[in-house]
Image (cartoon, rainbow, N blue to C red):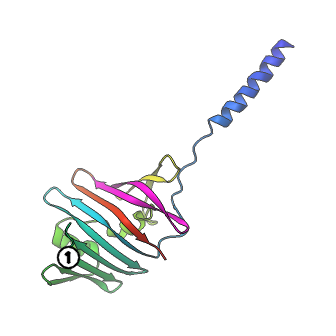
Amino acid sequence: MRLARGVWLLGLLFLDACSLFKPVPPPAVAVGVGPLRAFHLEGRISLKTETQSFAGGIGWLHRDDDDEILLSTPLGQGVAELRGSRGGVVLTDGEGRQYQAADAETLLEQHLGVRLPLRGLLYWLDARPRPDSPYGVEADRDGRVGALTQDGWRIDYGRYARQGERWLPGKLFASHGEGVEFRLVVDNWQVP
């Protein structure tokens, strides 16, 4: 009788322990509802490569397949404006010179000497992987995406803020190997 009661108590303790140590579910890869189709963000950006660096402001207006990105100095003076659509991309520098290419990644590589993952960045801003490429994901303590790895990049997220029905990251740090680091701090999100 004692043995049976002991086994029964041990079973209750085990069940209770199982309820205390539930496995942590994987993070929600898609934080929010559906992909971001349109947004406007204002923030600060820094880019560091093996040969150069930039720090300043960013304003980004995205609508479906159209983008307008304005980069400025820390004091607000325009450095470059990037306008893109399905028809191509135009970069206007601070002196008014214009450069064109079929896509933004190629255009920036020609003028910065580094290929930035702009196709992926549209997804990564929303803490989502690009759907056509393998990825890895790690949860933060709240169950949101804390880190994402894709296309040789590691993207770490922080300071989520609620925007309507979705949570958007306020900080993004992306690194590629030893050579390229990209930081974005979003001061203001506007999502329709």
- Which residue is nearer to you in this view: 128 or 57? 57
- Would residue 117 appear left or right of 49 to someone viewing this image? right
In the rendering, at what x and y percent does residue 47 appear? Answer: 23, 61
Q: Can you say whether 129 is above or below 59 in the image?
A: above
Give the magenta part as a residue range. Answer: 153-176
Query: Residue at the location (53% across, 64% down)?
Result: 32
In the rendered image, residue 20 lying in the magenta stretch gets the answer no
Say if residue 32 shows up in the picture.
yes
Q: Which residue is mark 1?
A: 78
In the rendering, at what x and y percent does residue 68 appear? Answer: 32, 79
Query: Residue at the location (14% across, 60% down)?
Result: 52
Query: Residue at the location (54% across, 49% down)?
Result: 26
Label 1 Cα neighbours within 10 Å, binned few <14 / some 14-19 / many ≥20: some
Quarter of the image for residue 98 reads bottom left
In the rendering, at what x and y percent does residue 6 appear? Answer: 78, 17
- Would residue 102 appear left or right of 141 to someone viewing this image? left
Most common secondary structure along the magenta stretch: strand
Q: Can you say whether 77 is above or below 100 in the image?
A: above
- Which residue is nearer to you in this view: 177 or 75? 75
In the rendered image, residue 175 lying in the magenta stretch gets the answer yes
Residue farthest top in this picture? 2
Q: What is the secondary structure assignment of the residue under circle 1?
A: strand
